[in-house]
Every structure is written in C-alpha cells, then in structure tokens.
Amino acid sequence: MLIIGHRGARGLGPENTLLALRKGMACADLVEVDLRLTRDGIPVAIHDATVDRTTNGTGPVKGHTVEDLAGLDAGEGERIPTLGEVLDLVRNVTGLVVEIKEPGTEAIIVSALMDRMPERLFLVSFHSESVATAKRLLPGAQAGFIYSEETGDPVGLARSVQADLILPRWDRVSHELVEEAHAAGLLVVPWLLNTEDDIREALRLGIDGFSSDDPCVSRQYLRD
C-alpha cells in the first residue's frame, strides 16, 4: 500500500514547501508537488494559479520571475521551491508525484526531471492531454489521470492516454471501480484519505495507495 504525502505533507508544514516535503518523506513512499511555470519558464511547486493564498505576495505565478518568487514567504519562513530543488531533496531517498497543473508545460517539466530522476516517479494531471503528452515524453515514468467529477468511463479514458494509474477523489471509489481498473492493468490511488475509518475502508476495497496530508499518522493507521 503506497502512501503519498499530499503537497509534501500539508498537514505538517506549509504546502508544497521543502519543509512539508521533508516531513512527508519521513513516512511516505512518495511525496507530491504541484507544478506551474514562472514568467521565465522555471517549474516551481505551487498549487494555485496565483500566489495570494499560500504566500505573502499577490498576483499570478506566471506573472513573476523565479527570482521574484524566491523573495516571498510561503509560510514559516519557507520559500516556493523550484522543481530542481525538489529533485535534489528527494533524489535517492523517496519517490515523487508531479502534478502537471498547466497543459503545454509538459516538455519543460520532463526535461528537468530527466536530469535528476527520482527513484520512482508518477506524472499525473487532471488534464488527459497532459497525461498523454507526459507519457510520450517520458515513457519510463508512471502516468496517472486525476479526477474529481463523474467522467463516465475513467478507466477507458485512462487507458486511451496510456495511463498506468487513476487517482479518483475518494468519494468516487467503489469496489466495482477498483475491480475494473485492476482488470485493465491500472493502479487505483485515490485522494484524500486522512482518517482511520477511510483508510480501513480503502484497504477493504483493495486500492493500491492513497494520498494523505499526514503520511506519518496514516502509516501508523496501517500498522495498527
């Protein structure tokens, strides 16, 4: 059962920062970051399209240079890290889940990843075209399709873009979905599981892993 630290481990530190990643790495099999590009084309770890919610700055991420972003406080004195900094941190220690937030950024992200490949890599996105592009550019990585709304045939859609896993929102998971996905050769890795009851139910359904805000507590639930 894979445990993924959501946005590093946002329950333990400011999301998508090196502090949250370090805390997540203590217990998770993989840690996850969201990637967007700066004005000067550098991939950085931030969830929102703007810096307003998670930093003391304002405006769109793509309106700032990487140097601009380095001067912002992302919480507890942390900065918005670049993908390069994330890769240096996780390399030879833990796996990495990269969520591609913006279609059209795949080539730049993959180029950075190829220079410093983590021990295990998932390239995931809500955008099916990004999943297909990422898998084509880096076939050695595992690619995943994320979804939260009803898609009709998530397994069929995932297979059509050469995905290796689906990442449904937890309330979209059923025994039937898990069986169908496994029959198609897909892993099922839902989000977001933070309670003991949810994790027990996930085990009963036979999922392959899950994302958690606090991987260490989740790890303890699995041990118990």
Image: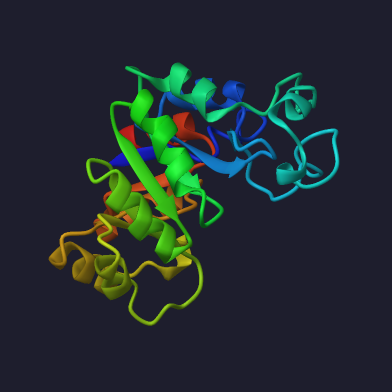
Q: Is residue 201 visible?
A: no
Is 202 situated above or below 139?
Answer: below
Residue 145 location, quadrant: bottom left
Residue placed furthest toward the front: 40
Asked whether 35 or 220 is in front, the reply is 35
Q: Give the x, y percent position of residue 98.
A: 45, 41
Asked whether 109 or 149 is in front, the reply is 109
Please name the residue shown 41% across and 25% down the image. Answer: 27
Q: Give the x, y percent position of residue 127.
A: 47, 63
The image's colouring method is rainbow
Residue 25 location, quadrant: top left
Please name the residue shown 67% across and 29% down the image. Answer: 80
Is 106 situated above or below 2?
Answer: below
Q: Give the x, y percent position of residue 71.
A: 79, 22
Residue 67 location, quadrant: top right
Q: Count of labels shown? A: 0
Query: In the image, 87: left or right of 16?
Result: left
Q: Is residue 29 visible?
A: yes
Query: In the image, 169: left or right of 60?
Result: left
Please name the residue shown 52% across and 29% down the image. Answer: 83
Q: Give the x, y percent position of residue 5.
A: 47, 36
Is 165 situated above or below 107?
Answer: below
Please name the residue shown 61% across and 26% down the image. Answer: 81
Look at the image and tell me in which quarter the C terminus lies: top left
Query: In the image, 18: left or right of 96?
Result: right
Look at the image and tell me in which quarter the N terminus lies: top left
Asked whether 150 or 142 is in front, the reply is 142
